Amino acid sequence: MTMSLTLSIPLTCFVPKDSSVNSPRYRVFTVTCSSAIGTPALGLAERPWKVSDARLVLEDGSVWKAKSFGASGTQVGEVVFNTSLTGYQEILTDPSYAGQFVLMTNPHIGNTGVNFDDEESTKCFLAGLVIRSLSISTSNWRCKKTLGDYLAERNIMGIYDVDTRAITRRLREDGSLIGVLSTEKTKTDEELLLMSRSWDIVGIDLISGVSCKEPYEWVDKTNSEWAFNSRDRETFHIIAYDFGIKHNILRRLASYGCKITVVPSTWPASETLKLKPDGVLFSNGPGDPSAVPYAVETVKDIIGKVPVFGICMGHQLLGQALGGKTFKMKFGHHGGNHPVRNLRSGEVEISAQNHNYAVDPASLPEGVEVTHVNLNDGSCAGLAYAAKNIMSLQYHPEASPGPHDSDYGNGNPLFTYMLKCDDDLLKRVKFLLYCYSGLSVCQPIFFFFNLSIYCIKFID
Ligand SMILES: NC(=O)CC[C@H](N)C(=O)O
């Protein structure tokens, strides 16, 4: 059944007192929702009066009472905060969050439900979701189910009605913390605390749990509705190492004319080189880059022989393979609003990021160039080593957190830079250019969503 609600809202409540806007005093808003009465699955996620039935116990001894949604049980993980306003579904399906609880600083989550197009992988690998307020209704033309139903089906725990601001301040002051989330009443706070203190994410190989088991070919391109900056004139064969690869990286490469073979994280370098690819991509992935020495060895065996490009974990592994060091940051970067400066062009990009580790530029050998820096803390956000045809980024150029600044397109500064270089260098780094300029997708819906928020703020 389709319901139509007509709301008469005094417009004066949206207009500043000194506004000169000449408009009727009342405007009629018509809201149409296609939820059947008596089947609240798509309309109501949770009754707002549900009582606390979950606890988040942090390793610092603090206990946070909350209400559960999604799966129930007891789960341990590292708590990180994410500052994205939109894109919770991309976050939920980003394999790099394996072993982590994602706390969203945006207080209102779940309002657009979930759909089948925005997934970055086929599973949710994160430990759980921590939010302030779970939207009691979902409203989006692409919505297929509620966030609560989605998490329950994937056996992922979620909690809401928890003071996410206070936890974020704590994480900002003390750094990322291990926590235990539980809906089990039989477990005491002390037991949960002990559990949190006896688990660690450092030094664990989380990549093996998320990587594909067999090689496969990837052909899907960015959906034409969202596509921009596509090029399919030329075809490059790319081998993409799956350390927890996000689908949009593959879609953007396909849209830029790449034929892609995705291989498991343990795929031998010799097999890769036998295929004589035009380039190799080292993907993003979860956990500590120092815990996967086998992956660093693979990277070492490949660099210098074919052009390579690294994203996030791939960037960190490249840093190590070049002789550099990675270190754990205090609370990392997780969000769709991180400013990054491109040191070659001087331009600033608003980027999507998700990492807790970084490459220490001082540890890198001579000749390796830091191409990008994160403007929030000056950390290394990109590297290039022309002598070995290497480029890498710490952030996610394929993402569209609203802006798609990191999809440089044809008229991008790097392209201009390349054209000034000699022909040989241009040829050698052509693949890198394709990767670099290709990794982003337009999602106008986010743009308009953000725009509407700004408008509401403006007239409020
Ligand atoms: N997105 C990623 O690839 C993350 C890399 C690594 N797991 C980190 O936290 O820094």
Image (spheres, helix red, strand yellow):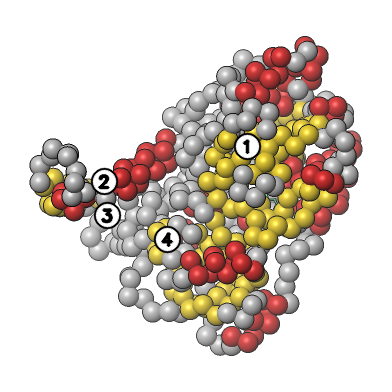
Mark 3 or 4: in front is 4
Farthest top residue in view: 423
**Residue 148 at least partly seen:** yes
Q: Which residue is mark 3?
A: 35
Question: For the residue marked with disc 3, what is the amino acid?
Answer: Ser
**Badge 1, how many Cα within 10 Å: few under 14, some, many 20+?**
some
Q: Is residue 278 above or below residue 248?
A: above
Is disc 4 placed on a helix, strand or loop?
Answer: loop
| Image coordinates for residue 246, horizontal then vertical, percent | 62, 43
Which residue corresponds to the image point at 68% horizontal and 20% vertical from the top-left? 417
Residue 123 appears in the figure: no
Q: CA distance from mark 4 to mark 2?
A: 21 Å
Q: Secondary structure at mark 3?
A: loop
Q: Residues within 10 Å of mark 4 (few under 14, many from 20)?
A: some
Dot 1 or dot 4, earlier in sequence? 4
Label 4 sits on residue: 107
Q: Earlier in the sequence, mark 3 or mark 4?
A: 3
The answer to whether mark 1 and mark 2 are in CB contact below 8 A is no
Separation of marks 1 and 3 at Cα, in angstroms: 46 Å
> Residue beneath label 1, please?
341
211 is higher (above) or lower (below) than 342: below
Q: Nearer the viewer, residue 127 or 152?
A: 127
Q: Nearer the viewer, residue 436 or 125?
A: 436
Of mark 1 and mark 2, the one earlier in the sequence is 1
Q: Which residue is mark 2?
A: 459
Q: Horizontally, is 284 left or right of 153 in the view?
A: right
* Disc 1 to disc 4, C-alpha distance: 29 Å
Q: What percent of the width, then of the height, locates residue 336?
A: 53, 46
